[in-house]
Image: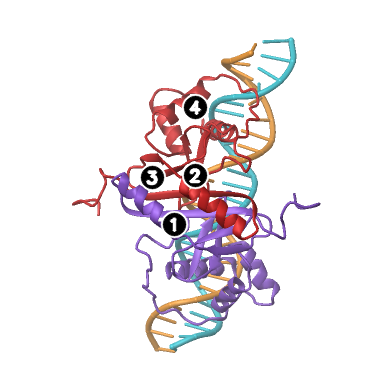
Chain colours: A purple, B red, C orange, D cyan
Amino acid sequence: MTVDHGPGGTPADTAPQRDTRQRRAVLAALDGAAGFRSAQDIHTSIRQSGTAIGLATVYRSLNLLSESGEIDVVRDAAGEQLFRRCGPEHHHHLVCVSCGTAVEVESAPVERWAAHVGEEHGFTEVRHSLEVFGLCGNCGPGPTAG
Amino acid sequence: MTVDHGPGGTPADTAPQRDTRQRRAVLAALDGAAGFRSAQDIHTSIRQSGTAIGLATVYRSLNLLSESGEIDVVRDAAGEQLFRRCGPEHHHHLVCVSCGTAVEVESAPVERWAAHVGEEHGFTEVRHSLEVFGLCGNCGPGPTAG
DNA sequence: CTTTGTGCAAAGGCTTTGCATGCTT
DNA sequence: AAGCATGCAAAGCCTTTGCACAAAG
C-alpha cells in the first residue's frame, strides 16, 4: 500500500509556498472527499466545480503537499496514487473498496508489532505501510453490492 | 504495499498451463532470488543466465503466476511491481530497502488486529496489505550506508 | 521587479496488447 | 494437427518535465 510520510516521520521542511487559487482548489477537493482520491479524479472534480486548472498543476500541488506531510499518499493495486488529507501523525486507514470511504484507525498494536519484528531480525530504520480494505456498512453484502 | 492474493484467500482456479522453458526460467529466477525482484530485473537475470526470453513473456508469466497464487506481488513506492515466490499461506514481509532481502514474518497479531478493526467499523470481507521496510543487518547504519 | 506557479504538450517509465510464428500436448 | 505460449514492437496508462506567460509577494 505504501503510505509514505518518509522514514523520519514529520518532514517539516515547509518551503514558503504561494497562495494560489489552484493550490486552494486542490486542498478543497481533498477536504471535500470522503476517502482517497486519485490525482485525475481531483483534477476533474476541480474543473467541474468551475475552477480552471491543469492536470500537471494538480500533480505538482499534490506532490508538494505530500512532501510537506500535509497529505497521505497510498497506491492502489493498479499502481495509481491515491491522496488524502489528514494529520501528520502516523496512522493507518480502513478503506472501503466500493465507495472509497476511508477511516483512520488506531494502530498502536501494529506499530509495536512492526518495531518488534524489525528488531528481532536485526533491522534498523524500520518503517511500514499498511492498509486495510473491506466493504463498509453501506456497501456491505446486499442485493446489488455484492 | 498491496500484497495481492485476491480477496478470497487461495484462488485455486489453476488453468492448465504449459511447461515451457521460459516459464521455468521465471520460476527459477524467483527461486534464486533472496527477496522481491522487479519484472525487468528478472528479465535481465534470465537473459544473463543464457536463456532467451522476451520482456512481455516475463510479464505474462508473472501475471499468470500471481493469479494462480503461486507468487506474491507487492508494489514499491515508485509504483513498480515486485514479485516473490512463496507459499499460498497469508503472511507478510520484512524487506530490506537496500539489498531487497525479504523475510517472511509472523503476523498473527496483525491478522487479529485487522479483523478486529474491520468489524468495529462495520466492514465485511476485510483484507489487508502490509509490508515492513528497514535496513537489514548487512546494510545497517555504517560508514557508507547511512 | 523578481520569483514562483501555471498550462500545454511532449517525454518518460512500467506494463499490456496485437499479430504471426514456434513449441507443447 | 490443434492450441496455447512466445517475441517484437507499438500502444496504453499514470506521472513528470520543459518552456513561456501570468500571477504573487
Label 3 amino acid? Val
Label 4 amino acid? Ile
Residue B43: horizontal and vertical position, in percent? 45, 33
Could you tell me which residue is drawn at 49 percent across and 32 percent down? B87
Discs 2 and 1 lie in a common subunit: no
Query: Helix, strand, or loop for circle 4?
Result: loop
Label 2 amino acid? Val
**What is the C-alpha distance between the residues marked 1 and 4?**
45 Å
Dot 3 alpha-carbon crowd within 10 angstroms: few under 14, some 14 to 19, many 20 or more: many
The disc at residue B128 is: none
Chain letter, disc 3 residue: B
Q: Which of pointers 2 and 1 indicates the residue nearer the eye?
A: 1
Query: Helix, strand, or loop for circle 3?
Result: strand
Residue B88 vertical placement versus A137 (above, below): above
**What is the C-alpha distance between the residues marked 4 and 3?**
28 Å
> Label 1: which residue?
A109
Chain letter, disc 1 residue: A
> Label 3: which residue?
B95
Label 1 amino acid? Pro
> Label 4: which residue?
B53
**What is the C-alpha distance between the residues marked 3 and 1?**
20 Å
**What is the C-alpha distance between the residues marked 2 and 1?**
23 Å
Q: Which of pointers 4 and 3 indicates the residue nearer the eye?
A: 3
> Label 2: which residue?
B74
Dot 2 alpha-carbon crowd within 10 angstroms: few under 14, some 14 to 19, many 20 or more: many
